Amino acid sequence: MWQKDRHQRIRALLSTLNRVSTERIMADLGVSRETVRRDLLDLEALGALRRVHGGAIKPDDEAPIAERAQTRVKAKVAIAKAATGVIASGQTLFIDAGTTTAALAEELAKLANLTVVTNSIDVALKMRGAERPAEAANEVILLGGSISDRAMATAGGATVLEIQRYRADVALLSPVGVDHRHGATNFDRDETDVARAMVENASRVVILADHSKLGQRSRMSYCPPERIDVLITNRKATESAEFAALKKKLPKIILA
């Protein structure tokens, strides 16, 4: 089968299934794993798909959170540790749901005198941390709302209304993608609404994104570049073509 025909078949599979495994492509096209790997690399370079562990998804989709939790773990932990340097005791923080912000919660749990307002059940549980005197304890506020189908988090109109009750010093958010034209973007509408409300009600916005998210754009923007105060990413981000453009646009980038 010619390469052009294979690419068309892979696009058709994604259009129908939204997510397709390497094994499914191999079976449908009757080709080797190495051929599929090359085709997925080519199609990803064209922006036709995003490679994930075991296959590919549509370019504006996102892998399941359980799968994302197992990828780029060292980078996420490094970003989380660096993020503790941009907050101070006594501050109120907005934190949204994601695998990077879950890593952040583990680091913040070691600190004291913070108020964390979050829609993430995982973040809230991790923030319980070690026991400490009442005067140094962190306060954790879990936002109400409907439980999301995509993650262990609350979302929906009730969650957004609750966010508007608070004013945060810093919003620490982890998007699907970030680029110099559209800023931070997300795939899910409810998650986007939550993140946008946090941006609107925070004095500063800190975006946490590893190198794989730089230059990526999902379907909904919630924070334009001019609203991002700090981007925290890992050092491999400097290899990205998008890094130089972001460096010119954003006031501060921290490499973890």
Image: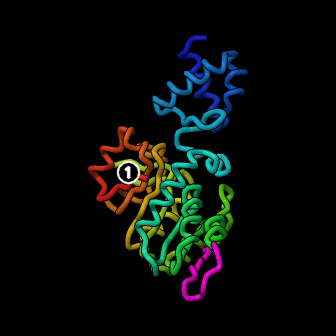
Residue 99: give x, y in percent of width and height: 59, 55
**Mark 1, other Cα within 10 Å: few <14 / some 14–19 / many ≥20:** some
- Residue 134 in the magenta stretch? The answer is yes
Q: Is residue 134 above or below residue 200?
A: below
Residue 17: give x, y in percent of width and height: 67, 36
Q: Residue at x 73, y 21 (%)?
A: 27
Q: Quadrant of residue 145?
A: bottom right
Helix, strand or loop for disc 1: loop
Q: Quadrant of residue 107?
A: bottom right
Q: Is residue 190 visible?
A: no
- Residue 217 in the magenta stretch? The answer is no
Q: Which residue is mark 1?
A: 182
Residue 152: give x, y in percent of width and height: 67, 61
Q: Quick check: 96 left or right of 222? A: right
- Give the residue type at disc 1: His
Q: Is residue 36 above or below residue 61?
A: above
Q: Residue at x 66, y 58 (%)?
A: 151
On-image quarter of the N terminus? top right
Q: Is residue 155 above or below residue 236?
A: below
Q: Residue at x 33, y 49 (%)?
A: 246
Residue that lies at the very extreme toward the top in this rendered image: 1
Q: How is the image coloured?
A: rainbow
Q: Is residue 18 above or below residue 155?
A: above
Q: Quick check: 211 left or right of 38? A: left
Residue 237: give x, y in percent of width and height: 41, 44
Magenta region, residue range? 129-143
